[in-house]
Amino acid sequence: MPGYVIVGMQWGDEGKGKIVDYLTAEADMVVRHQGGNNAGHTVVVDGKQTVLHLIPSGILHDGTVCIIGNGTVLDPEVLCKELDSLDASQCAYHDRLFISSGAHIIMPYHKVLDGAQEKFRGSRKIGTTGRGIGPAYADKADRAAIRFADFVTPDLFRSKLAEILEYKNVLLTKVFDEKPLDADAVFDSYQGFADRLRPLAADTVAMVHEALATGKRVVFEGAQGTMLDLDHGTFPFVTSSTTLAGGVCSGSGVGPREVQGVIGIVKAYSTRVGEGPFPTELMDETGETLRKQGHEFGATTGRPRRCGWLDCVQLRRAAKLNGTTGIVLTKPDVLDVLDIIRICTAYDLDGKRISEFPTQVEDVARVKPVYEEMPGWKQDISGCRSWDSLPGNARRYFERIEKLIDVPINIVSVGPGREQTITHRSPFA
Ligand code: GDP
Ligand code: IMO
Ligand code: MG
């Protein structure tokens, strides 16, 4: 029963998509268990880039079963567009892509409300992706929502939609001064999506259990990152789902005993999109260099990502929160040009040295990072294909990270391409 979790250890965009695709070569099933199309997971195979938002990043491997689990929120229009792009690139997904009947549907009012709420928050905005994620999860918690099984059953979809819109239209018009939505018009415009997606409906819980019980290797693909977790992230500047490894259990219907390994994806520096505190953020030329060298622009919204040094206080917290058993270090090649590389090892909070990530966002905003410095390696590592061929200073940087977070390195990624990957110690060993 080997289940492995891939989890973002920072604020998202660590390179989860690339690593899930890489590991899928040795996996039978890939499961998305939370989030929606706020995610943008980039996979580059033979120079061709594919950005996936909801479809699991294992889809580019023939024969791998891909599951969109019950813990996700699903925008049917966006998913159909994603399927179009798979069709265009002749990636066959029929009979191996399945959607849980319990996945929640993102409806047009969720997207309108996401924008309207952000506008209302003004200077306190979260900087959401605007994809309706928060409002869709709020409706799930409020038990006033449409699930995938309802959506693909026309009578149920029609009646639930009419009932929900009665309330949503009051909210839209009276509170947010937005236009009301017409239930019939929404129903009609969504029927094409429902028809197309209906054949993908499945009892995915049974499928995942069947795979685990027959010794198949299942990879659970996390979206977003640890510090965006609804409970343990920098609340309220977080997303609305459980992004931690523990979310796998509720989001795909398995018990914790099914998880054999938790593989944490760590970018060799830090980035964050949207608002919220970011202790090691660089507002200077070095930050600009990281953004440029690392092409740090959002895969979903195109927004420039905020960049900063690696933060081992934050990463130690992430290792605890996820029970991380091994890490994958991505994008160290972006640091190739730097003379000096800094690592945050502790924080100063009001003159006191602390080594634990603060629980209150106001404190996170006030901490001053304490750095140690290491010399750069000043050479192109994107062509390295073995640990031993990496420059000494690069290896020393990686080993220092390993020591500071106290989790062993499994893999180092030295470029966006599938082949630009060095397995140091197999995470499946
Ligand atoms: P995800 O959301 O965690 O899947 O990450 P994104 O796809 O949003 O962002 C990661 C970006 O870095 C993508 O453009 C990837 O193609 C790219 N990438 C992934 N690994 C590496 C790497 O090791 N080096 C470089 N230079 N780029 C990488
Ligand atoms: P992947 O899977 C980076 C951020 C948004 C915003 C906050 C809330 O590609 O790593 P939301 O739309 O979820 O309500 O926005 O979360 N965010 C991400 N940042 N990578 C992501 O996904 C993100 N998904 C959401 O920028 O700050
Ligand atoms: Mg991303």
Image: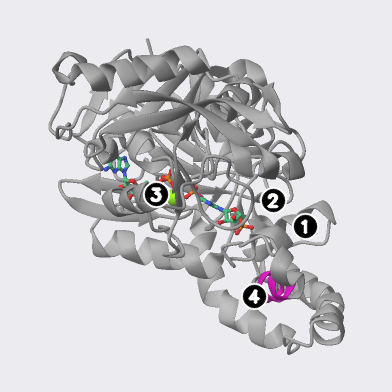
Q: Is residue 196 visible?
A: no
Mark 3 / mark 2, whichever is N-terminal: 2
In this rendering, the answer to whether 370 lies above or below 13 is: above
Q: Amino acid at mark 2?
A: Ser
Q: Disc 3 and disc 2: Cα gap in Å?
A: 28 Å
Q: Amino acid at mark 1?
A: Ala
Q: Which residue is mark 1?
A: 138
Mark 4 / mark 1, whichever is N-terminal: 4
Give the magenta part as a residue range.
112-119
Mark 3 / mark 1, whichever is N-terminal: 1
Query: CB under 8 Å between callouts 1 and 2?
Result: yes
Q: Which residue is mark 2?
A: 240
Q: Is mark 2 within 8 Å of ligand 2?
A: yes
Q: Position of residue 25 (x, y in %)?
A: 29, 30
Query: CB under 8 Å between callouts 2 and 4?
Result: no
Q: Position of residue 150 (x, y in %)?
A: 70, 61
In this rendering, the answer to whether 90 lies above or below 363 is: below
In this rendering, the answer to whether 174 lies above or below 214 is: below
Q: Nearer the viewer, residue 200 or 48?
A: 48
The mark lying in front, picked from 3 and 2, is 3
Q: Residue at x 41, y 65 (%)?
A: 302
Q: Position of residue 314 (x, y in %)?
A: 58, 30
Q: Disc 1 and disc 2: Cα gap in Å?
A: 8 Å
Q: Which residue is mark 4?
A: 108
Q: Position of residue 174 (x, y in %)?
A: 87, 85
Q: Residues within 10 Å of mark 2 (few under 14, many from 20)?
A: many
Label 3's element?
Answer: helix
The mark lying in front, picked from 1 and 2, is 2
